[in-house]
Image (cartoon, helix red, strand yellow):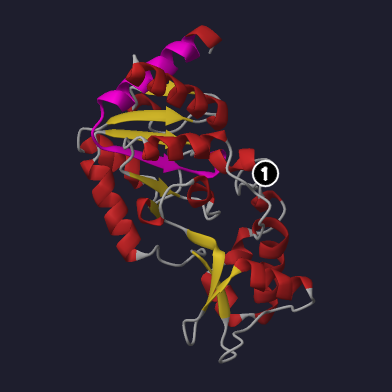
Amino acid sequence: MNSQNISALIAKTADLILQSRNLVVFTGAGISTESGIPDFRGPQGLWSRFDPDDFTIDKFLSDPESRHKQWYIFKEGLMTDKAVPNAAHVAIAELCEMGKLDCVITQNIDNLHQKAGVPDDKVFELHGNMQWAVCLECGRRYNFTEIKARLDAGEDIPDCTECHGMLKPAIVMFGEQLPYDVLQEAGRRARSSDLFIVIGSTLVVYPAAHMPRYAVQSGAKLVIINQGETPLDRDAVVCISARAGETMAAIVSKVKAKASS
């Protein structure tokens, strides 16, 4: 796709945002890789180096060796305070500040939407949040900074300092149900949207990938910004195959220019 075509699609997306009354943004790993967070399924993703079968909830709960391996991988690949929001996260937060954003539905577990300035109550995290661990016995929550410090100090499998119960990252593992309340409210928001923008998702992971389908079935216009094809491209009024950061920054810049003219 040439730059002239992308410019036209950016302008069209800006018009759709200005016309919308209920914009929902849906984000996947492709938005966060630009902040240095590894994805799972790409050529250099975590599953190219580790066996996803080791990340099941059953193995985490029943097998200390698997639990040790999972904590090690979390520490090395996912538990980071160095990642910062990129231009795409910032652009979405700007739409929120402008009153143009109903909510963000995200597959990501990195907390970068909140870091960029989107309020917690506008972010629906389908797969949890790696910034926290929770005790499965007493329910106490620990922030990742504290847990990472303990792992870096040599703990193999951190436990609860209060009751010595099992700690689990506050994310959804394979074989574990998505949080019911979050899933239900995200589905309701998708169905009530009039514009649904997908950013950085291949739309192949379910039930998360149902969200844009709900939106389209309810009459919303669909925009997809992703490097590569998705199963819903034919349902979209705009498809932009480009990097999330520069594309969203250009879209929001156009929105501001049009709004002030």
Verify whether residue 20 appears in magenta. yes
Q: Secondary structure at mark 1?
A: loop
**Location of mark 1 (residue):** 36
For mark 1, does the 10 Å Cα neighbourhood hold few (<14), some (14 to 19), or many (20 or more) residues?
few
| Residue drawn at point x = 73 percent, y = 60 percent | 76
For residue 108, side relative to residue 158 (left or right): left
Q: Nearer the viewer, residue 151 or 126?
A: 151
What is the tally of numbered marks visible in this picture? 1
| Residue drawn at point x = 65 percent, y = 67 percent | 145
Q: In the rendered view, would you say 208 is above or below 13? A: below
| Residue drawn at point x = 58 percent, y = 43 percent | 85
Q: Nearer the viewer, residue 120 or 80?
A: 120
For residue 158, side relative to residue 110 (left or right): right
Residue situated furthest bottom in the rendering: 163
Residue situated furthest right in the rendering: 154
| Residue drawn at point x = 74 percent, y = 78 percent | 156
Measured from the top left, where is residue 226 in percent x and y? 50, 31
Measured from the top left, where is residue 11 in percent x and y? 40, 15
Chain part drawn in magenta: 5-30
Q: Nearer the viewer, residue 142 or 177?
A: 142
For residue 86, side relative to residue 231 (left or right): right
Q: What amino acid is found at the position of numbered circle 1 in the picture? A: Gly
Q: In the rendered view, would you say 188 is above or below 258? A: below
The part of the image, by quadrant, that contains residue 142 is bottom right
Measured from the top left, where is residue 260 in percent x and y? 35, 19
